Image: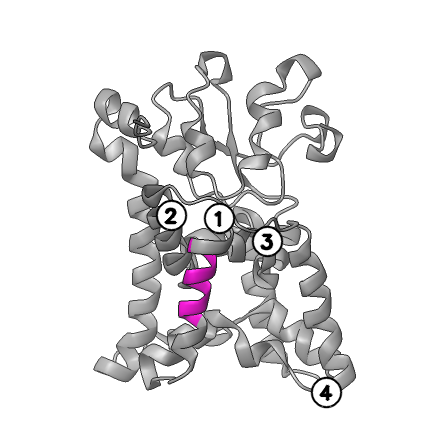
Amino acid sequence: MTKKRRQPGVEAREQLGWWHAHRFLLLRRATQLLVLALFLAGPVAGLWLLKGNLSSSELLGTVPLTDPLLLLQSVSAGHWPLSTLWWGALIVLVSYWLVGGRVFCSWICPVNLITDAAAWLRARLGLRDVSTLVRSTRYWLLAMVLALPAVTGVLVWEWVNPVPLLLRGLLFGMGAGWALLLALFVFDLLVAARGWCGHLCPVGAFWALVNRLGFIKVTASGRARCNQCMDCYAVCPEPQILKGPLLGARRGHGPLISAQECLNCGRCIDVCAQQVFTLSVGFAVKADNISEKQQ
């Protein structure tokens, strides 16, 4: 009889307490639901704190917020956006650049709720990948997203972008659009672990490029205490980025997780009973970090 694998985070929960083992996960869920609630509060309750959607919105009726990727698509299509959209894109871009671009994927994006649910169920069912995907595919898809408007004059990606699609569906209903979200869930559950966010999503690829530098990073500062329980690998959406900072001391690799694919989700911090990981505030010193490509 096959021994059932211990769920990651059990040891952290037993040694450090339930809150410590789930704090970043709970804070992320609260943030994602709060953002959705702010967008829904206007149409549902007439409280217009955040008007619009995740593509373009206005905070408190004054501060413009624009998805920089949407703006780039518009320029590619030959449409010059209004100055307020440029300012909105700059505000969003600088904000995410400071805290780490892929924070959008793990702390804001509503589709993350769907893909995380698929990952949770997949782990409990013990399912294996039936297809191997190349992670760089998302960057090729990002290039296509930016190139197609130049050829067609239309923002093709925005027709199927599940991020604004989900919010529009909650507000107005979207019929067959729910089939797309269900397809993403089934794909991540049955085909490839973290298949959408980790391998295909062009939005995630864009924010990964922004994340090359950031003010907040995760660091394996306590890696000398690591007992190789592998819990961090089990919960990390991008586990390939952990090897160098965690195990690369002899090769001169610093403990800072400097890879642009890191989501700053904090799950490695949650589940580590040895308290290997923590958040580092301040810009990375390049000399202290060897590129993941050199491993």
| Distance between the alpha carbons at the discs numbered 4 and 2 | 40 Å
Give the foreground label among 3 and 2: 2
* Circle number at residue 122: 2
Give the Cα distance between marks 3 and 2: 17 Å
Crowd around label 1: few <14 · some 14–19 · many ≥20 (10 Å):
many
| Disc number placed over residue 153 in the picture, else none | 4
Give x and y (percent) for residue 271.
35, 30
Give above or below for 86 relative to 134. below
For marks 4 and 3, give the one nearer the viewer. 3
Please, what is the three-letter code of the amino acid marked with disc 2? Arg
**Residue that lies at the very extreme toward the front in this rendered image:** 1
Identity, as a three-letter code, of the amino acid under mark 3: His
Percent across and percent down for residue 5 are 33, 29
- First in residue order: circle 4 vs circle 3: 4
Instruction: Classify residue 23 as left or right of residue 207.
Output: left
Q: Amino acid at mark 4?
A: Gly
Q: Which mark is residue 199?
A: 3
The residue sitting at 37% across, 42% down in the picture is 123
Residue interval drawn in magenta: 181-189
Image quadrant of residue 258?
A: top right
N-term mark: 1 or 3:
1
Using the image, determine if residue 256 lies above or below residue 162.
Answer: above
| Image side of residue 27 versus residue 91, left or right | left
Badge 1 vs badge 3, beta-carbon distance below 8 Å: no
| Front-most of residues 176 and 203 | 176
Q: Position of residue 269 (x, y in %)?
A: 40, 31
Scheme of image coloration: one colour
| Residue pointed to by mark 1 | 193
Q: Is residue 262 above or below residue 41?
A: above
